[in-house]
Amino acid sequence: MNIVILAAGMGKRMQSALPKVLHPLAGKALLSHVIDTARTLSPTSICVIYGHGGDMVPQMLRSDNLGFARQEPQLGTGHAVMQALPQLQDDVPTLILYGDVPLTRSESLRRLLDQAGGDKLSILTVNMEDPTGYGRIVRDNDRIVRIVEQKDASEQERAITEVNTGIMVAPTARLRAWLSTLSNDNAQGEYYLTDIVARAVADGVPVVSAQPDAVWETLGVNSKVQLAELERIHQRNLAYRLLEQGVTLADPARIDIRGSLTCGRDVSIDVGCVFEGDVTLGDGVTIGANCVLKNVRVGDGVSIKPFCHFEDAAIGAKSVIGPYARLRPGTMLAEDVHIGNFVEVKNSQIAAGSKANHLAYVGDATVGSRVNIGAGTITCNYDGANKLRTVIEDDAFIGSDTQLVAPVTVGRGATLGAGTTLTKDAPAGSLTVSRGRQTTIEGWKRPVKQPK
Ligand code: UD1
Ligand code: MG
């Protein structure tokens, strides 16, 4: 099939400079949701009709096998589909989607396509308790005869609760012919796509309908309120999918997934966590409250305590991280690593069994196995111009409040005394310390306040 996605509308009620269809839902543009769903149907072609916001839409979403057609000015949904005609193949049907209706499931679209066959006009309809604003499906003895828009409808027609979702499938050659006969002689002065229904009936082309499983699949975004509502519906769906897979969620209403979250068995996630990009959690992972994970791979049995922030990082099995830990891009932790509170790690590899449990900065470092990094340790990795590396070999012990001025290497099994400022390599197996010797001044007296 051909797929046409209508996305030229202006979205005035969003109160935003960004074209409506580029606003994110679950971290991804509304229109990208529609394109991704369209792609699951393996169409012959996809054509996005854009207009409002200039070239921003094609610029931001340009990709392989995606066509664009500009609609300027925007004279209605029928006029929008006309812009796609040069890109449509006549021997396959055309599916019309809306760029601001992000949650339609492919199953519902397949049902609609099955109904259409190659030769029928098929409309996705729903029954709404309050159909205000929608085009109504007018039937005569059950047969659809036309669609009437809210603004053109009579009192009687407005009482109809079956509405046009806007999503439909048409035989392409017929669609071409029908569109050429549209007029804008209606309440809105627009070329209505919906007028093709009456044309089909006049031509003796059967008009059929299909219904989605849920009404939310057909809901569009016109305002920030509706965007927030659809975000919640989508997040609830994602959360329930996780629950069905056996993931424990402290509260399915308090998790946000903006990308893909893949979980092993017996994963448990506390409230307030946000997952962005691609996140993979191994078996038995537990995540405490209020953590943000973006593009992270977490090994089996890892325990993440509350209030952690990770980005572009990998965490080895059985590690214990947090609370209040920050893993920045390029962090690679091996098995059984402990990163504690107020520890920041960036672009560093830390090998198995090593620990940095309190208040440390480990940046541009290669840390061996079973290393202990004491509280307050800082790798001084930046000289104001260049980033430089610190190497800490296996079994080293870094005393508290140590500065490692890179480039510098701490040899295997070396010990650094607390408070050391290391500017030269520390030899393996020895104690290195750089601090003034401790002295006690005999007879020293604390000053006392002089009487006035
Ligand atoms: C349309 C339908 C109505 C249906 C409703 C479902 C028509 C005439 N009416 O009404 O039957 O119940 O959707 O939400 O089709 N667009 C363009 N170019 C234009 C006009 C619109 O690309 O010139 C796009 C919009 O960006 C939007 C979609 O088409 O994605 C629908 O446009 P909108 O103005 O929201 O249509 P409605 O009046 O709500
Ligand atoms: Mg309109």
Image (spheres, rainbow, N blue to C red):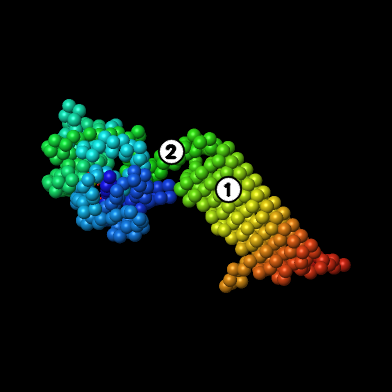
Which residue is at a point 82% across and 66% down the rendered structure image?
438
Foreground pick, 366 / 153: 366
Horizontal and vertical percent position of residue 46 = 30, 50
Within 10 Å of disc 2 (Cα), the crowding (few <14, some 14-19, many 20+) is: some
Query: Looking at the image, in which quadrant does ligand 1 appear?
Result: top left
Q: Which residue is mark 1?
A: 298
Circle 1: element type: strand
Circle 2: element type: helix
Q: Residue furthest bottom?
A: 385
Horizontal and vertical percent position of residue 436 = 79, 69
Which residue is at a point 46% across and 48% down the rendered structure image?
259
Q: Are marks 2 and 1 in contact (CB under 8 Å)?
A: no
Location of the C terminus (image quadrant): bottom right
Which residue is at a point 50% across and 45% down the rendered structure image?
261
**What amino acid is at disc 1?**
Val
Foreground pick, 14 / 168: 168
Horizontal and vertical percent position of residue 406 = 66, 68
**What amino acid is at disc 2?**
Asn
Image side of residue 106 versus residue 442, left or right: left
Horizontal and vertical percent position of residue 136 = 22, 36
Q: Which residue is mark 2?
A: 237
Can I make out residue 219 in this image?
Answer: yes
Image side of residue 61 versus residue 91, left or right: right
